Image (cartoon, coloured by chain):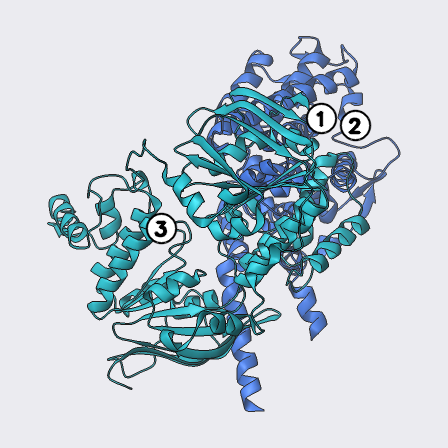
Chain colours: A blue, B cyan
Amino acid sequence: MEKIKKITSMQLFLPIVCLVAVLLINVITTPGFFKISINNGVLYGYIVDVVNRASELVILAVGMTLVTAASGGQDISVGAVMAVAGAVICQILSGGEVSVNQIANPIILAVIAGVIVAGICGAFNGFLVAKLNIQPMVATLILYTAGRGIAQLITKGQITYIRDESYQVIGGFIKGCPVPTPIFVAIIVVVITMVILKKTALGLYIESVGINGDASRLVGLNSTMIKFLTYVICGVLAGVAGWVASSRIYSADANNIGLNLEMDAILAVALGGNNLGGGKFSLAGSIIGAFTIQALTTTLYAMNVSGDQLPVYKAIVVVVIVVLQSPVFKKFMATQKARKAAAQGGGQ
Amino acid sequence: MDGNVVLTMRDISKTFPGVKALQHVDFTLRKGEIHALMGENGAGKSTLIKVLTGVHEFETGEIKMEGESAAIINKSPQDAQNHGISTVYQEVNLCPNLTVAENLFIGREPRKAGFIDWRTMNKKSTELLNDLGIDATATQKLEECSLAKQQMIAIARAVDMKCRVLILDEPTSSLDDEEVEKLFVLMNRLKSEGVGIIFVTHFLEQVYAVCDRITVLRNGELVGEYTTRDLPRVMLVAKMMGKDFDDLADIKSGHTGVQEKAAIIEAEQLGHKGTIRPFDLTINKGEVIGLSGLLGSGRSELVRAIYGADKPDAGVLKVNGKEVKINAPIDAMKLGMAYLPEDRKKEGIIADLSVRENIILALQAKRGMFHPMSKKEMEDAADKYIEMLQIKTASRETPIKSLSGGNQQKCIIGRWLLTEPEYLILDEPTRGIDIGTKTEIQKLVLDLADKGMSVTFISSEVEEMLRTCSRMIILRDGYKVGELTGDELSQEGVMKAIAGGDNKNGED
């Protein structure tokens, strides 16, 4: 009994239950859901697809978690920043052409430039939020609306195609490796972030600033700097996600890369049991949340729900999950349990 | 039920995870009486109030109100209000950005054809304010009123809602003497009108000034109910603490203090526009200095300027003889300073973090992000201060917000002691804290000074400072107006200095 209590009271318990529930539904509706086969030397199957497609979302969710924890608000510009990064990378690779079959500049150079530009976007958001004290939603709304326009400007209104196989590796497969590359990118991002949080005091600082900025300042923390930093990190990660996304379609499609992904990222953070008002956070929770959302999307596609109707079903599931995790509901359950216990105690 | 009784609580029990907050507590309130609810921190006063007002649910027992045959269960403060139970908290829970009238009538605005009838509302408000002798206008913003007035307005709101039970939870903590006096007049008036008042406070003088009856709680259990005149102060304290009265006045004896005059902090014409006028101040090693003055006189602002919490815009600060530039608190910390802020909730604790994290936070910040403390280091540090300061907590991983006020304050003190400061600033460390902990903190201050630490102590209670300080700085209206040492250090001397001589301008 004690053990069960201990498990259920863990922060990650509900997010995991939600993920398992979604996966269970999958197994029931799509019997072959967990089947993995190898076609043409690469892994193939629904579950592989979920994990692969979730990569960008996981990367974004990591950044979003940090931003949420430190500033008590969300960065809604990440989807647009992905498009900007994609545009910068493709434009450099194409050397200004609309469509090329061979890259004009080294990939590494293009990627670094793209990620730096994304980082600058993050810094811009961070400056508005941390220094000027603008509400995160409002501050990041600027790039949310302007970002795709900037991306269009960079690509001169065209969709830049890079039909060079070397560019497709990061969004596709490394030769001889059956596992899709985006999975590795997501793992690397998560591991680096976790190492940073573990090996420095950044995690504690972020939580502290997010819970009580005034008190944090008085104990010697630079609240402004810490908030700013989380936005820069979030921007950089959006850049990485943009790189993966544009490599998948070997082009810079300013209108579609990362479209509506910011909302999924915020949702992932919420599903992970994180408080959107800032403070204590769980990176693992957000990652589980990201997989839950992607599993859900893939399920619905597998059930032949059309893309237009998808949001409706998603919304229903999300409502259920969010209610399950709400403090009011938790309190309700706790009272029910206490009453039951009291009734049993009285009976003896 | 006795005809005179307005409220009875019987056999109330409430548990929080790991803590029995209330165990079989009884409480009776009669019409037209002021009833003090006393106890140390963590005794269960707040919990009892919260159970009564529906903030917390209780597990056993019943609450009865006069005129209602069935036992009532309040599910929310709103419910309680409908039963005629109103609460005024230490932190006023009104809306500062609304007008006085709006605050008085929020949620029950007089209406005309569906719209708010502003004229009637303002007129009624003015009447109510006049009637209760509250010096405020209906149309001014609440935030323009002093805290004392805000509190009275909160009471006026409760009175106007025909409350039969009025709970005042530490209403006087942030008021000065004159304001307290006004509050008492108001309380006595309500009493004569038959309202039963539950008065929660830490100030013994105030209990004996207005209360008819005292109920004492200790560790969640009822100690007893007494009439005030039958319970001498010493007895009350003994009952609250559950031990014989350790004479508070005695703690200074034996502490001679180090009096080699080595200046550690020297301020020359240091000032911050709008809060504290330029001042000179020298603080020596091993010295306990008190800052005294009325609320808003610049006590906190002076130390905040030194610590860099409000960056000074004039003057020079020297630490150990060297001129320094402090841009942010972290700079001050690196120079060996530590600052326990006045507002524990807003500026002290990081509510959701654990006791351990709260204790190590300042040291971690001082070390920098890239030198994290190891798990063991953190746990040792936390355990050391939990043990040393006798912090009552279920474990070191308990969120600090679930500790009682006094224990939270001890955590914050531990946080700063861990950084091994040379100069410790304590701004109202004993506010809202029980007598036992107060004495402990005062003793601690003297011990630290004996070990060579310089301490600046700010408190609204002059006696407390007289017991601990070797020198006192007096502030008035943002000016440093005097320093008292030796024989001048007496209740009378301090009062005189605070009140000022010829240039008394008669405002508060």
Tags 3 and 2 both on a single chain: no
Proximity of marks 3 and 2: CB atoms separated by less than 8 Å: no
Residue B403 visible in image: no
Q: Which mark is residue A169?
A: 2
SS assignment at label 3 = helix
Chain-order first, disc 2 or disc 1: 2
Question: Where is the N terminus of chain B found, in terms of image quarters?
Answer: bottom left
Image check: B230 left or right of A218? left
Residue at point 19%, 51% (across, down):
B133
In the image, B456 versus A278, the foreground residue is: B456
In the image, A221 versus A126, the foreground residue is: A221
Q: Which mark is residue B237?
A: none
Q: Which mark is residue A247?
A: 1
How far is disc 2 from disc 1 in space, using C-alphas? 7 Å
Residue at point 89%, 34% (across, down):
A176
In the image, A183 versus A58, the foreground residue is: A58
Tags 2 and 1 both on a single chain: yes
Q: Chain of mark 2?
A: A
Q: Position of residue B258 (x, y in %)?
A: 69, 42
Proximity of marks 2 and 1: CB atoms separated by less than 8 Å: yes
Question: Where is the C terminus of chain B found, in terms of image quarters?
Answer: top left
Q: Chain of mark 3?
A: B
**A87 above or below B506?**
above
Q: Position of residue B173 (x, y in %)?
A: 42, 53
In the image, A112 versus B504, the foreground residue is: B504
Image check: B33 left or right of A190? left
Category of crowding for the residue at label 1, using alpha-carbon neighbours closer than 10 angstroms: few (below 14), some (14–19), many (at least 20):
many
Residue at point 52%, 48% (across, down):
B465
Dot 3 corresponds to which residue?
B177
Looking at the image, which residue sits at the far top?
Answer: A96
